[in-house]
Image: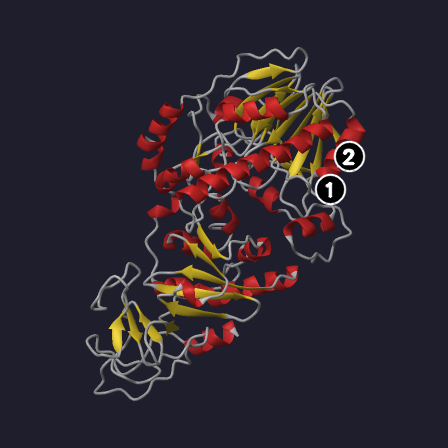
């Protein structure tokens, strides 16, 4: 049996009869364009059309990459774990492939003596998943087989050699599945395991300075390495290949590469050779090279990349790329806020399902210096002008390009919160500096999928800078207009004239001292007296306001 390292978690496992391609992410652009490879691969997805099977461990784009699969022969059968939910299977089938869902812990014969056994990271034990992610169990079908966790691992054997591929499965949640493998198979010839962090932290934390990011980067790297040692001690393999989670950030995020917990491979190799069991041999390979499990012979010895050449490639090539969503038009404030009542309903459903509550306030800047203030204890939401984090005891602020934010609001068919976060597209700051896993779990449901959404034209906004301004409710006004003055445009709530030069109504923008600059998302006319912002000049003469806010408010409540 030979094992060929390709990129990140992509490996080719083969003997003289059968080839299995695992987690083929072979082209740049995962996570909405932010993840790339270095060096640039010298092979194409089409080069692997001769494989007999494709195994995909889980839904994350550096494992399930539609851009790679779209270029491959869709007649190749795809193997996945039989997850509780069919989102991975459905996504692969949408690309034209036939998918076989393999039950947890069952050794399946693929032909000519080759077998595969796919196991859930959590061992199909909901309690393990709940304890790890800090949430209570909420699936009514908890007694049925199927993982509640996003990851799976695979054992591939041909009766003579055995390979274990744990990819992104986290320790200790994966310990029970790993011990089952060790009991059932005994000697392990090759272990492929993660050693770095495929995550946003610490590079996307916006309130860390340079020194804090470097310190946290090094701490996370050490932590990931030490967790990997648990797999090595448990399996006691003859050979082990640290892999997966290897990437380079592109586009406007390229400057964050120095902070990712994704160390040079030669440094990781040195760590494992110094700390791993002596009777296991560390195997690092360059892309396209292979190792024989029969002899331990490698097609070529590992050669570290030139770090200066890598930096130049990042600056000259990767930094110039654009993300998928940057071709979208910038949404107006009205477009964004129209999704919020429905997204909040979905978030609340999720929060109640997993039993999560927190005093932390989530702040989500929209456009035009208007920020969404979101509770995580069922207390609702409201819109704030020029939100100041000093006004909150505990907060998390999420900075997202409004074009991507619109996709996130549209729902999973357009963009996933988890993928945007992993891809470092979400700038995160927080006080206190505590990672509330359940909070981000809930935010994954903060979208309006399943609802028909119409653009809004006004919303009640609290202005933290003007004295006497009353904080307002999360939901819009009832659309009733007071008598207008001579047919001029008026505020729907207080009836005052919306004269741009008046003392009580301004075009709200922090960047304009006169308060009259139109923002990127459109002009916002802000009423200091009642806290209502009219969006994008959608204010009609005579106090009439476009749209039916009464029905929207009823839907939100």
Q: Residues within 10 Å of mark 1 (few under 14, many from 20)?
A: many
Indicate the secondary structure of the residue bearing disc 1.
loop
Q: Nearer the viewer, residue 320 or 305?
A: 305
Residue 491 horizontal side relative to residue 14, left or right: left
Q: Is residue 98 above or below residue 125?
A: above
Q: Is residue 158 above or below residue 474?
A: above
Q: Which residue is mark 2?
A: 180
Q: Residue at x 49, y 25 (%)?
A: 46
Left-right relation of 288 to 326 = right
Mark 1 / mark 2, whichever is N-terminal: 1
The numbered mark at residue 44 is: none
Q: Name the element at disc 2.
A: helix
Identify which residue, 303 or 297, lies in the foreground. Answer: 303
Instruction: Look at 36% across and 77% down and name the residue there.
Output: 531
What's the mark number on residue 123?
1
Q: Are marks 1 and 2 in contact (CB under 8 Å)?
A: yes
Q: Residue at x 57, y 16 (%)?
A: 290
């Amino acid at each position: 049996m030979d094992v060929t390292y390709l990129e990140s978690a992509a490996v080719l496992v083969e003997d003289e009869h059968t080839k299995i391609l695992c987690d083929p992410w072979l082209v740049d652009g995962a996570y909405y364009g932010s993840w790339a490879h270095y060096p640039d691969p010298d092979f194409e997805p089409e080069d692997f059309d001769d494989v007999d099977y494709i195994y995909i461990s889980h839904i994350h784009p550096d494992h399930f990459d539609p851009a790679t699969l779209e270029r491959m022969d869709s007649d190749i059968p795809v193997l996945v774990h039989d997850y509780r939910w069919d989102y991975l299977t459905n996504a692969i089938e949408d690309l034209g492939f036939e998918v076989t869902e393999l039950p947890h812990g069952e050794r399946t014969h693929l032909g000519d003596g080759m077998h595969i056994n796919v196991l859930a990271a959590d061992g199909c034990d909901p309690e393990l998943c709940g304890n790890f992610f800090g949430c209570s169990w909420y699936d009514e079908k908890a007694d049925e087989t199927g993982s509640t966790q996003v990851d799976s691992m695979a054992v591939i054997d041909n009766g003579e050699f055995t390979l274990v591929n744990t990819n992104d499965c986290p320790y200790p949640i994966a310990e029970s599945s790993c011990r089952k493998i060790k009991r059932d198979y005994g000697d392990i010839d090759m272990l492929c395991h993660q050693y770095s962090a495929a995550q946003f932290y610490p590079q996307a934390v916006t309130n860390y300075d340079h020194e804090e990011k470097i310190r946290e980067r090094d701490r996370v790297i050490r932590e990931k390495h030490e967790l990997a040692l648990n797999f090595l001690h448990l399996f006691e393999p003859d050979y082990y290949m640290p892999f997966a989670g290897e990437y380079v950030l592109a586009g406007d995020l390229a400057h964050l590469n120095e902070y990712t917990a994704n160390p040079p491979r030669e440094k990781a190799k040195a760590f494992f050779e110094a700390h791993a069991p002596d009777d296991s041999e560390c195997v690092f390979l360059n892309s396209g090279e292979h190792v024989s499990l029969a002899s331990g012979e490698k097609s070529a010895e590992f050669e570290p990349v030139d770090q200066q050449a890598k930096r130049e490639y990042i600056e000259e090539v990767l930094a110039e790329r654009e993300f998928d969503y940057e071709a979208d038009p910038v949404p107006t404030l009205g477009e964004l806020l129209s999704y919020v009542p429905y997204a909040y309903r979905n978030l609340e459903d999720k929060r109640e399902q997993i039993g999560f509550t927190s005093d932390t306030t989530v702040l989500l800047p929209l456009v035009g210096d208007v920020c969404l203030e979101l509770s995580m204890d069922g207390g609702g939401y409201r819109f704030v002008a020029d939100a100041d984090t000093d006004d909150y005891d505990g907060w998390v602020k999420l900075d997202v390009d409004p074009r991507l934010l619109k996709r996130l609001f549209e729902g999973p068919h357009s963009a996933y919160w988890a993928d945007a976060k992993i891809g470092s597209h979400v700038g995160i700051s927080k006080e206190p500096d505590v990672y509330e896993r359940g909070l981000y779990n809930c935010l994954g449901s903060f979208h309006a999928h399943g609802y028909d959404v119409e653009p809004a034209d006004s919303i009640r906004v609290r202005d933290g800078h003007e004295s006497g301004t009353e904080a307002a409710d999360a939901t819009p006004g009832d659309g009733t207009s007071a008598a207008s003055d001579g047919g001029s445009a008026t505020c729907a709530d207080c009836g005052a004239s919306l004269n741009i030069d008046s003392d009580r109504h301004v075009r709200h923008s922090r960047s304009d001292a006169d308060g009259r600059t139109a923002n990127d998302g459109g002009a916002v006319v802000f009423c200091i007296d009642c806290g209502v912002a009219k969006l994008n000049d959608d204010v009609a003469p005579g106090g009439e306001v476009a749209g039916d806010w009464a029905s929207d408010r009823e839907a939100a409540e």
